[in-house]
Amino acid sequence: MPTKLFLSLRGKFIILFALLITVPFFISGWITYYQYISNVEEDSRRYTRQIIEQVHINLDRYMKDMDRITMAPYYNQNVMNILRKHPRQSNSVFVTSDEYSKMNLMISSLTFDRSEIRSILIFALDGNLFSNLETTVDRYWEASSNPWMADVQKGDGSIVILPPHDAGYYLDGTERVISIARVVREISTNEYLGIVKVDLTEMGFKSLLDSTNYNGKSQIYISDRNGVVIFPIDGVDMDSSLSWKEINNSKEQISAKVSSEFTGMQVTGFIPKSEVTAGARKLVRSTIIVSVISMLVAYLLAVVASSRLVKPIRHLQKKMKKVQMGDFGERAEVASHDEIGHLTGGFNMMVTEIERLIKEVYESKLREKDAQLSTLESQINPHFIYNTLESINLMALESNHPKLSSVVVSLGRLLRFTVDKDERLVYLKDELLFVESYIQIQSYRLGGQLQMELDVDMGHEEYLVPKLMLQPLIENVIEHAMEEDPVIVRIATYLEEDHFVITVSDDGKGISEERMRQIEAHIYKESNEHGARDGFGFKKKGFALRNVHWRIRLLFGPNYGLFLDKSNKQGTHFIVKIPLQWEGE
């Protein structure tokens, strides 16, 4: 067996004092830190949401303005007439200078003083392209070079927000733009006439953010209803090297999101947690410094206090070692009137009593051996009785007395149930079998005048009941209810909330009211004294019912026991109430 490490009481006091100071400091610091972080994060999340709410309002206002621009062709009869002259079947109809002039006039009026608009374009179905940028935009378009048109046509006349895409109709090279577009249709016939498209610069969205007071280290992203990033273009913030995907999947960001009911666009804001927790880290450093200083002071106080506390205990320890060696004349000096002084006085009293206790233990062991011998001897008696009953049974069978044999067998069952089983609680079905055996014996004696009826649910037979609880009630029927006519004993069970109720009733001559009051007084009397002592050979009566009642109360409490039902006019009616119990409880 490995030797256990010895740790002195003084060392334990020092460790205890250190822990009492150190642990609360660390726990309070830990809780304070996380509470502070939680509050700051909540404030930052609330601040971010306020910002993106403002951006969302500005964005909706901006999109509604763009929506009005895309609706402008409907309010210009010249534009609608020109689009009607260039249907899909015409296959590149020649555009006159007058048509270009009218288109340019309308488009230029929409772009006046709108620096965030790169260009406004109107796509006729025959392949002609009208724009405010005559020198830098191609005058013709092809469907294969403009795959974005499929999304606009799906919009069926509603405003469509096109995420960053390549525009190949610029003469100075392909540009990546964000656009607002819609299909233009004939008002009366809903005929498809063309597409109006507004190309926006990234600085237009940047101006929306400049109107809000947000931290330069924060990032705000604008995406469409499908989650595709619209701003910044390509999903990379102008002031950050992180992409939309990297920030959106990062656990080091505090985020908030607002969706527009008008366009379905989403505004998402992010704030780095490192910026939020900067103040918390300063708090942790100051807490650690305070904790270290407090622990050093606690160690010093622990050393001083432990020395004063341990000194009388060491004195008592020396005395105990001498007593341990067999010197029971030693006594410890009581030097204080605190708990240690009481402990020392208790030690002195203990030493005084040790010899007497040793003697009592020695004698109790002798008595225990005698009890074991008596138990072994008592086990012989039941086997002797069983063998004797078996011999009587064989003699009854040989003499052709089957009823007597049945009585002997039933008597053997009674003895085995009462002697062999030590349990206080038994299954109801076993108790009923015991009662049936008892009634079988008594019926032989009474000539069949005693009969039994059972009204017991099969599920109730597995409930636990006190052993030998029903037999005294049957015996009471035999002694007080029997007359010339046969008597039927009825045993029934039912559940009452969480109580298990067993009723034992008969149809015999019954009990008078005076006698019933005497029986109740005898059953419920708490004292064990019952008058004068009985003489030799005198048979005591009335103790069986009292025994049943008080055994139940001792097992389950004062709410349970044996009760008499006085409402019955014929026979007697006993009620046994016990808690509902089954195996395994």
Image (tube, rainbow, N blue to C red):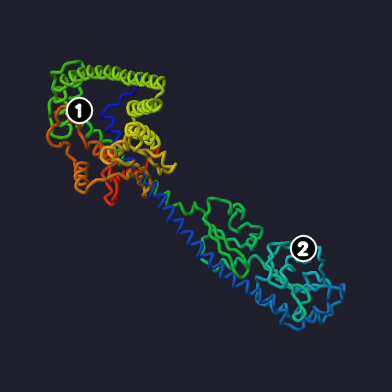
Q: Residues within 10 Å of mark 2 (few under 14, many from 20)?
A: few
Q: Residues within 10 Å of mark 1 (few under 14, many from 20)?
A: some
**Residue at image mark 2:** 147
Q: Position of residue 442 (x, y in %)?
A: 33, 33
| Badge 1 vs badge 2, beta-carbon distance below 8 Å | no
The quarter of the image holding the C terminus is: top left
Q: Looking at the rendering, which quadrant does residue 348 occupy?
A: top left
Above or below residue 359? Residue 85 is below
In terms of secondary structure, where does tag 1 sit? helix
Q: Which numbered disc covers residue 313?
A: 1
Q: Which numbered disc covers residue 88?
A: none
Above or below residue 330? Residue 122 is below
Q: Please say whether residue 25 is visible from this viewpoint.
A: no
Q: Looking at the rendering, which quadrant does residue 428 occupy?
A: top left
Q: Position of residue 486 (x, y in %)?
A: 34, 41
Is 9 left, or right, of 26 in this rendering?
Answer: left
Q: Residue at x 38, y 22 (%)?
A: 396
Q: Number of labelled discs?
A: 2
Q: Please say whether residue 161 is visible from this viewpoint.
A: yes
Nearest the viewer among 292 and 478 is: 478
